[in-house]
Image (spheres, rainbow, N blue to C red):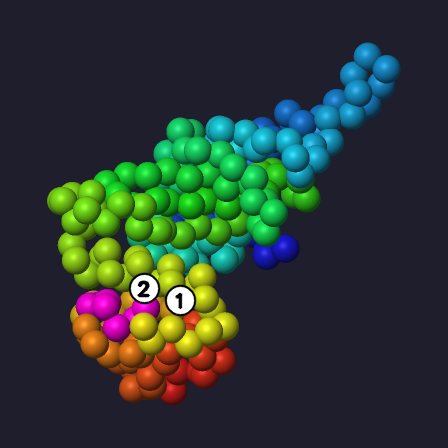
Amino acid sequence: MASRQPGPGVEETPGFRSLPEPTAYADAVGGAQPSAESPSRHRSPEDPPPRTPSLYAQTDHFRQRLHQQGRYVSVPIVTEAIKAGQLRWNTTDGWRFALVKDGIRYVVVVSDTETRSPVVVTGWTEVADWAAASDSDRWDDTDIHTIRLRADLSAHRDEQIPDRIRPRAVDRAFEIGGHRVVTEVGAGSVECIECDGRFRSKDELNRRHCRR
């Protein structure tokens, strides 16, 4: 499991500063000793995670994503997803909260069975409704193309996907695999503006270090 930054929870995060250890969750589920009258409260992976954002800490991986260009995941969005998003179990990475706003789906992966507090593990965005996203004042065309392109690269990470890259127009660089990439309509690859490398898959982006 990724290491995590302790914190009072996503709901109380003041910017990007480091956070103190949350204790409410540990006290709530682990404070009582098991007995005939009070059985063990140890949670299993199948138990739905709590919907109280203030209980959640954050992994280093998630906090790094908060700083990366083109991620579109924020602490307020995570808070809203935990409170009101759709909750589903995924066999790959466990419990996910999903929230759709202005045509974009925010996915937040959490875990709460191997740590002292529940933890926000990671998060990402997907285009849920292209027309709704385009009509929204929240997104411009570059935002939407960036979200779709990043999702396609992640969904087919080991494959070269020139046909999925060609429709995209991204002139504002976003960060992926240590590179800052852009692309234009008709190009079958993304180009790093720092090292001029061209890539057709996320695997290539991750394997080839950016030579800035």
Three-letter code, disc 2:
Leu
Q: Which residue is more in the foreground, 25 or 141? A: 141
Label 1 element class: helix
Q: Are marks 2 and 1 in contact (CB under 8 Å)?
A: yes
Query: Does 169 lie within the magenta span?
Result: yes
> As displayed, is residue 208 above or below residue 173?
below
Q: Residue at x 49, y 80 (%)?
A: 207
Q: Where the C terminus falls, by quadrant?
A: bottom left
Q: Is residue 207 visible?
A: yes
Q: Which residue is more in the foreground, 109 or 28? A: 109
- The percent coordinates of residue 131 (x first, y second) are 19, 46
Which residue is identified by label 2?
A: 149
Label 2 to label 1: alpha-carbon separation: 6 Å
Q: Which residue is more in the foreground, 155 or 110? A: 155
Q: Residue at x 67, y 27 (%)?
A: 29
- The percent coordinates of residue 184 (x first, y second) are 20, 74
- The percent coordinates of residue 37 (x first, y second) are 82, 12
Q: Is residue 8 visible?
A: no
Three-letter code, disc 1:
Leu
> As displayed, is residue 114 above or below residue 172?
above
Q: For the view shown, which residue lies furthest in the front direction? A: 163
Which residue is identified by label 1?
A: 153
Query: Does 152 lie within the magenta span?
Result: no
Label 2 element class: helix
In the picture, residue 69 is in which quadrant?
bottom left
Q: Residues within 10 Å of mark 1 (few under 14, many from 20)?
A: many
Is 57 positioned to the left or the right of 79 in the image?
A: right
- The percent coordinates of residue 12 (x first, y second) are 41, 36
Q: Residue at x 37, y 38 (%)?
A: 99
What range of the chain is rendered magenta?
Answer: 164-170
Q: Residues within 10 Å of mark 2 (few under 14, many from 20)?
A: many
> As displayed, is residue 78 above or below residue 2?
above
